Image (tube, helix red, strand yellow):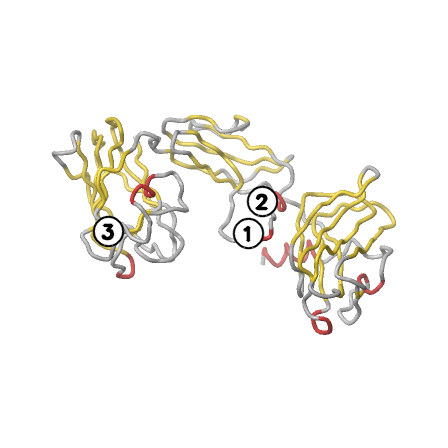
């Protein structure tokens, strides 16, 4: 219902209604289209008075001329000159370009490349009241924390577009490393040895959701001591490289384990496991964690079990009954989700 309301509110009103331009692209009829004389060109649209928009909908006449556009852009006449406000690759049956709010009375659609002379059947403009973006809190191996808009797995990057920039109005980010409300303005990465960060995006009077992230021990001094095996060039060091897009993958033959030197002794309260999301293979469902102060004598910190990993491959947390003093840690996996024979780890983090 909420999605339906947002679609109706945004696209139920065409802000190019009553605009001047080629009638075939403004009449709302899929049966009419403007056919270019070559593979490049432009169409200009002017409104009776300035309008504020952040969406442009384009359609090609697929049924009569097929899909032909390969590159296109949209401009607005701002301060006496044309300024590009969006660009993308193909149009096809329907392409919705999204961009920060623009107020103007003249707009231009440019076809930059096409396979054959394209036919554009529809151009309309719309406005969506942007919300502050969701945030993600990331920490590099050397302990620098950065806060940025969440980049979903599916976005427009293959076409050179920035999804978050396109969808968001101007905003500021506030954060805190205490238990209070985010109130420190974020101006760039900052160093945090360990702890917890809460952050929130603010756009005018609108406040976004508070994002909260536990920050583990910095990984710059970690060293790989041993790994049971490696496969497909997915090395064991990828399990703690502060990059969740890379991961360690073991061979199919067990038992599976990885041993890490944390570089110094820490009073560990728990750890987290981030599964890889490339596929469903090797998600670590069960295992045990051992710790040591010298790398020779090992003691158990406890067993762990993570459920529903394939359907919900998000970071999982396991806290110990009592803090353990350790410099060396060993993870021994005893079972993988869906009966997989190998083990994969995108990131391991330890918390004080």
**Structural crowding at the residue carrying mark 1, measured as other residues with C-alpha within 10 Å and reported as few (<14), some (14–19) or many (≥20):** few
Q: Secondary structure at mark 3?
A: strand
Whether residues under marks 1 and 2 lie with C-beta atoms below 8 angstroms apart, the answer is yes
User: Along the horizontal axis of the image, is 328 left or right of 121?
Assistant: left
Q: Which residue corresponds to mark 1?
A: 155
| Res 42 → quadrant | bottom right
Q: Which mark is residue 221?
A: none
Position in image of residue 137 (x %, y %): 46, 37
How many marks can you see?
Answer: 3
**Residue drawn at point x = 80 percent, y = 69 percent:** 32
Position in image of residue 126 (x %, y %): 72, 52
Mark found first going from the N terminus, 1 or 3: 1
Q: CA distance from mark 1 to mark 3?
A: 33 Å
Position in image of residue 191 (x %, y %): 43, 26
Mark found first going from the N terminus, 1 or 2: 1
Residue 246, relative to residue 115: is it above or below? above
Residue 212, relative to residue 45: is it above or below? above
User: Along the horizontal axis of the image, is 89 left or right of 14?
Assistant: left
Q: CA distance from mark 1 to mark 2?
A: 9 Å
State which quarter of the image contains the N terminus. Answer: bottom right
User: Along the horizontal axis of the image, is 252 left or right of 96?
Assistant: left
Farthest bottom residue in view = 64
Q: Which residue corresponds to mark 2?
A: 164
Residue 294, relative to residue 230: is it above or below? above
Whether residues under marks 3 and 2 lie with C-beta atoms below 8 angstroms apart, the answer is no
Q: Which residue corresponds to mark 3?
A: 286
Q: Secondary structure at mark 1?
A: loop
User: Which one is in front in this view, the residue at disc 1 or the one at disc 3?
Assistant: 1
Residue 276, relative to residue 320: is it above or below? below
State which quarter of the image contains the C terminus. Answer: top left
């Amino acid at each position: 219902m909420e999605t339906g309301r947002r679609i109706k509110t945004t696209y139920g009103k065409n802000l190019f209604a009553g605009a001047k331009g080629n009638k075939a692209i403004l009449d709302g009829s899929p049966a009419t289209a403007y056919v270019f004389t070559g593979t490049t060109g432009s169409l200009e649209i002017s409104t009776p008075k300035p309008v504020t928009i952040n969406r442009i909908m384009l359609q090609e006449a697929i049924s009569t001329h097929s899909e032909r556009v390969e590159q296109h852009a949209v401009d607005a006449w701002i301060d006496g000159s044309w300024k590009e406000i969006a660009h993308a690759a193909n149009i096809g049956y329907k392409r919705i370009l999204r961009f920060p709010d623009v107020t103007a009375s003249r707009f231009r659609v440019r076809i930059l490349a096409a396979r054959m002379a394209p036919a554009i059947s529809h151009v309309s403009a719309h406005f969506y009241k942007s919300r502050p973006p969701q945030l993600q809190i990331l920490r590099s191996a050397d302990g620098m924390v950065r806060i940025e808009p969440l980049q979903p797995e599916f976005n427009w990057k293959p076409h050179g577009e920035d999804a978050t920039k396109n969808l968001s109005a101007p905003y500021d980010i506030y954060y805190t490393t205490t238990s209070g409300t985010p109130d420190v303005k974020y101006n760039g990465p900052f160093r945090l040895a360990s702890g917890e960060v809460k952050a929130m995006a603010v756009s005018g009077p609108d406040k976004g959701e508070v994002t909260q992230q536990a920050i583990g021990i910095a990984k710059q001094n970690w060293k790989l001591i041993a790994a049971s095996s490696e496969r497909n060039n997915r090395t064991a060091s990828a399990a703690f490289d502060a990059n969740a897009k890379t991961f360690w993958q073991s061979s199919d033959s067990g038992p599976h384990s990885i041993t890490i030197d944390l570089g110094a002794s820490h009073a560990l309260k728990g750890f987290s496991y981030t599964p890889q999301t490339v596929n469903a293979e090797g998600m670590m469902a069960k295992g045990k964690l051992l710790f040591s102060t010298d790398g020779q004598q090992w003691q158990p910190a406890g067993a762990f079990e993570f459920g529903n990993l394939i359907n919900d491959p998000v970071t999982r947390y396991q806290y110990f009954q009592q803090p353990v003093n350790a410099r060396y840690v060993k993870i021994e996996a005893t079972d993988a989700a869906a009966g997989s024979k190998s083990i994969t780890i995108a990131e391991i983090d330890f918390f004080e």
